[in-house]
Amino acid sequence: METSTVAYRPQVSEIDLLRLMIRMRAFEEVVITAARAGLIHGELHLAVGQEAVAAGMVGTLRREDALVSTHRGHHHALAKEVPIRPLLAEICERATGLCGGYGGHMHLFCPEVNFSTTGIVGASIPLALGYAYAAHLEDHDRVAVAVTGDGGAQTGAFHEALSIAGAWKLPLVVVVENNQYAISVPISAASPTKTIAERSPAYGAWGRTVDGSDVETVMNAFADAVAYARSGEGPAILEAVCWRFRGHYEGDVDLYRPAADKDLAIAKWDPLIRSRQRLIDRKVAGGEELDAIENEESSALQRLLAEVQKDPLPDPVNARQPFTAPRAL
């Protein structure tokens, strides 16, 4: 598994990159607050601890590139520059949301930046394959990115989509957020291979496994994966090994993971702590400056949640009518 040895290449400043991860963490924290207040219904899946994977896509993806995410997709939406207010409003089921409050937290769509999610495990890959095929038919150098987890990598959709992408050399990049558990099943109990990326030769694909808690490592590898796919060489599989610090869903008692393992992961593999210390060591920023950024992002999102709570709920009468997103996006 690769770790960072060189400075990341995309033109994103180190401090802006950390700020984005701080915003992602703060966003999930206000979503937790909203869920506890009864503003969100159904299973809620958060990605606290996995910020470096999403942030590592920034600076490489273009607006026209498609990104199809999962039930755990808030970070990816922020990385793809989905407007934050309608994003939070949709999660909180408000009429001002991306989909008018009818989609909710697992069905987020923002065609303006070619971002979408699906709540079906593994389904992001064939959906992204469709975007990749469209780019191929139009002879355009767009790429399509599918995010999935280690559980999604065990599905037939993973195999079928990558088989087609490899045979037709389609510009598909599959990012596997390997947080090592498919709900409660460890990857060692479900995968015939030690890593997901080592399967890439079977699909004629580029493949690499990296430390998903190191944002610079992810950035470098993701840039390589996208460059490979964009050049017409075929699909790419980037596996980012990471930890989700909360249960599979909010309310999951999470007894299947040893407490000592979780404590060690939070202490050693928190991407925000790692990036923060790197910036201090490099004298890019001091602790007080970074503390101020954390406070600023947290306060801004708390204010945003207070605003969103006052927004109207969607009208049930219009639930079956075509929805047009507000042009403010």
Image (tube, rainbow, N blue to C red):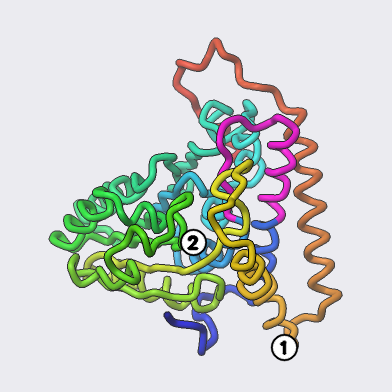
x and y percentages locating residue 217 in the rendered image: 50, 78
User: Vertically, is 219 above or below 147?
Assistant: below
Asked whether residue 319 is in view, the answer is yes
- Residue shown at the point (66%, 50%) measured from the top left: 28
x and y percentages locating residue 189 in the rendered image: 36, 60
From the viewer's side, name the closer residue of 280 and 247. Answer: 247
Q: What element carries label 2?
A: loop
* Mark 2 burial class by Cα count in 10 Å: few <14, some 14-19, many 20+: many
Q: In which quarter of the image is the N terminus?
A: bottom left
- Residue shown at the point (57%, 44%) measured from the top left: 249
Q: Residue furthest top?
A: 317
Asked whether residue 271 is in view, the answer is no
Q: Residue furthest left?
A: 167
Magenta part of the protein: which range?
26-47
Residue that mark 1 sits on: 281
Q: In which quarter of the image is the C terminus?
A: top right
Tell me which amino acid carries mark 2: Asn
Calculate the distance from the C-alpha at mark 1 to the C-alpha at mark 2: 28 Å
Asked whether residue 37 is drawn in magenta, I would say yes
From the viewer's side, name the closer residue of 46 and 185. Answer: 185
x and y percentages locating residue 321 in the rendered image: 46, 16
Indicate which disc, 1 or 2, sits on the residue closer to the N terminus: 2
- Residue shown at the point (58%, 62%) measured from the top left: 258
Q: Is mark 1 on a helix, strand or loop?
A: helix
Residue 95 as seen in the image, left or right of residue 134: right
User: Vertically, is 34 above or below 256?
Assistant: above
Tell me which amino acid carries mark 1: Asp
Residue that mark 2 sits on: 179
From the viewer's side, name the closer residue of 194 and 203. Answer: 194
* Mark 1 burial class by Cα count in 10 Å: few <14, some 14-19, many 20+: few
Asked whether residue 245 is drawn in magenta, I would say no
